Image (spheres, rainbow, N blue to C red):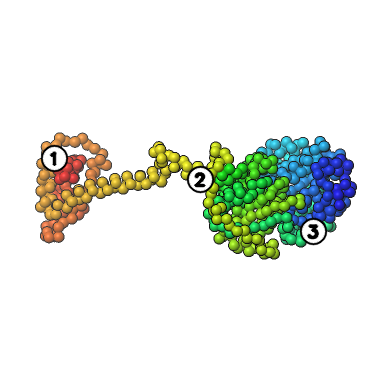
Amino acid sequence: MKFEELELHQELKKTLSDQGFIDLTPIQEKSLPYVMEGRDLTGLAQTGTGKTLCFLLPILNYIYSQAIDGHTALILAPTRELVLQICEEAEKLLKNTPHKVASIIGGVGYKSQEKELKEKAAILVATPGRLIDHMKSGKIDMSQIKYFVLDEADRMFDMGFVKDIRYIMKLCPKDKQTLLFSATMSYYVLRIASDYLDDAIQVRVEPEKVTTDNIEQFILHLGKEEKLPHLVNMIQNECNEGLGIIFTNLKAMVPEIVYILRKYGIAATGISSSLDQKKRVRLLKQFKLGKFQYMVATDVASRGLDVDDINYVFNFDLPEDTESYVHRIGRTARAGRTGKSFSFCSERDYTELEKIQTLLKRKIDIMEINESYLEFPQPNPIDPNEAPPKRERKERFQRNNNHRGKTKPRREHAKQGTQNHKEKNTQRKSKLNKYQKEKLRLDSVDQAKEFVEKADSVLQQEKPHKKRSKKKQTGRQENIKPNKNDNAEQVDKQYDKSKRNLFDINDQPAENQKPKTIWKRIRSFFGG
């Protein structure tokens, strides 16, 4: 069936023809007649089958045919990238009309979105979170919504948007037409369909195989450290024509892979949830225009990303979710084209490999490893001024500064400080030991008396000191332990345990004691 055979507005038919839309896909052919009649519908089909036009065409036909003033359609999608892609498709088909499309997504300033809402864009395409923010602030008038669409519903439920979707649907008019499209039929999809869709038609397009025959799939068994050099060599020697996407499970790996690819002359960029929305949009647009040959991404780009001429898909890591594998490799071989997918399986990925092959109901072909690819080729940086990842910059900074002798890493400063501290402690201990040895020479009461007599002779020669505070008068007090060989009774009479100062052995009154600051001189007298 062709688009010309549908009952659409003539201007819309002409626009479709200009955009190159001629034949309907199976899901479009089955669902569009019911949607054009105004029936609620649940459409199930795998990614890349043309579900977007299934809900855009009836909305656009209404806009072309009716004089509208306000928000006519609300389309919810799980990711920002998918929202922007739907907006792009709708804007192409509305280019000959004064009507506009507004994107309501996070990561973008509220003021620009509020401006679009004030202009009463005909179609609102949004992620649930940011849409609810505008609804609660009273910036969106939902009273004129005629079409409500949930795209990639299964993924929205997986991402935890169930409560948000129910909240939004309750605030929409009851007489709206509801369209729900999904790749799989999950429990939540069934619940939403039964609770909010009125006598819905269910259209299902089951492929004979989970993946298309147009994709050649290969598994490469590589060690963790062998992945990057093998990836670089494969792109340089075998996969250097057309565009490609490299998927990784960790967003921290995205900048590292991009840096390595650029180091060896491969034009690459990367997107992940770590980047702000404006930069993600800009990089994605540049990739579509061919400025970059390869894009490194997490699963944020595994669904809804429609880019022409993607010939290669690399799974740098096997996905933990088996269905994500199908969506990843589905970025290639779109619209009847052919493509190749290469999945790197390390020692940690065998469990995921078994699950994927169970889902596909077949074994993935194993690709022979080229031993020469396990080492990096000669570097050929595409942009020598490109800033490497933070970890690489930190290592380079430390190497350069250590070589120049201008600064030291923090760890070396810490080690040096600890060493100095130990040396000071050693010096203190040696001085203390020296003083203690001198003290131990006084191993009898007679020697103690002798010590006191010498001290008295020194004190008589000194001038009287000024009165000082008690804190300053209190000197360092030492204990005298009597010798075991001495008579215990004699020691007890001459040694009062309540008085711990050597000058108190003769039981002198405190008022007759000389200033205790002379201790330093006494210590020096004995070599202390």
Q: Earlier in the sequence, mark 1 or mark 3?
A: 3
Residue 204 circle label = 3
> What amino acid type is highlighted by mark number 1?
Leu
In the rendered image, the vertical position of residue 353 relative to residue 278, given as above or below: below
Give the residue pinned by disc 2.
Answer: 391
Q: Secondary structure at mark 3?
A: strand
Residue drawn at the location 22% of the way across and 36% of the way down:
467
Few, some or many residues within 10 Å of mark 3 (<14, 14–19, 20+)? some
**Residue underneath mark 1:** 459
Q: What residue is shown at x 72% (from left), y 42% (from top)?
A: 103
**Nearest-to-viewer mark from 1 and 3:** 3
Looking at the image, residue 480 sits to the left or right of residue 272; the answer is: left
**Where residue 490 sits: x, y (%)?**
11, 57
Q: Nearer the viewer, mark 2 or mark 1?
A: 2
Tell me the crowding category of disc 2: few under 14, some 14 to 19, or many 20 or more residues within 10 angstroms, Cα based: few
In the rendered image, residue 225, in percent from the top left (x then y), is placed at: 53, 54
- Disc 2 residue type (three-letter): Arg
Q: Depth check: give the residue in front, 525 or 382.
A: 382
Q: Position of residue 487 (x, y in %)?
A: 11, 60
Residue at x 76% of width, y 59% of height: 207
